[in-house]
Amino acid sequence: MIKITRLNHQELVINAEHIEFVEATPDTVISLVSGKKMVVSESVDEIINRVIAYKQAIARIQVKNPGNSPE
C-alpha cells in the first residue's frame, strides 16, 4: 500500500499492486487495473519511488520470514 494525495489535499492509501500505469498529463494520473483513474499531487517519479519502497519492504519481510511467503 502507498499513500497518495488527491488534488483537493485529501490523503488516501491505494494498493500498489493494482496500479496499471502512471502518466503525467501534466497532472499525475494513476490508472488502476479496475479502470479507475486518480489525479494526484505527487509526481510520476514520487509514485515510482513509493512503489519501489513498498516492493522492497515486502521483499525484506519475505526474506526474514521465508516460511510465510505465499505460494
Image: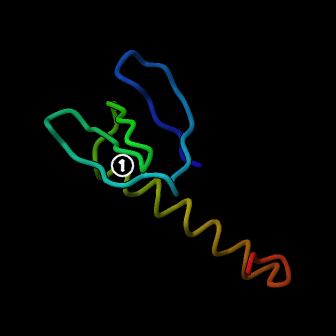
Is residue 14 found left or right of 37 in the rendered image? right
**In the visual, does 9 lie left or right of 61?**
left
Residue depicted at 54% across the width and 41% down the height: 14
Expressed as whole percent of the image width and height from the top left, the position of residue 46 reads 36, 48
Residue 10 % position (x, y)? 48, 20
The front one of 47 and 18 is 18
Image location of residue 16, percent across then percent down: 51, 53
Quarter of the view holding residue 49: bottom left
Q: Position of residue 54 (x, y in %)?
A: 56, 59
Please state, as top left, top right, bottom left or bottom right, where the C terminus lies in the image: bottom right
Instruction: Kindly identify the amino acid type of the residue bearing the numbered disc 1.
Output: Glu
Q: Report which residue position mark 1 lands on.
A: 46
Residue for point 80% across, 84% down: 66
Q: Secondary structure at mark 1?
A: helix
Please say if 9 is above or below 18: above
Residue at 37 percent across and 56 percent down: it is 48
Q: Is residue 1 above or below residue 66?
A: above
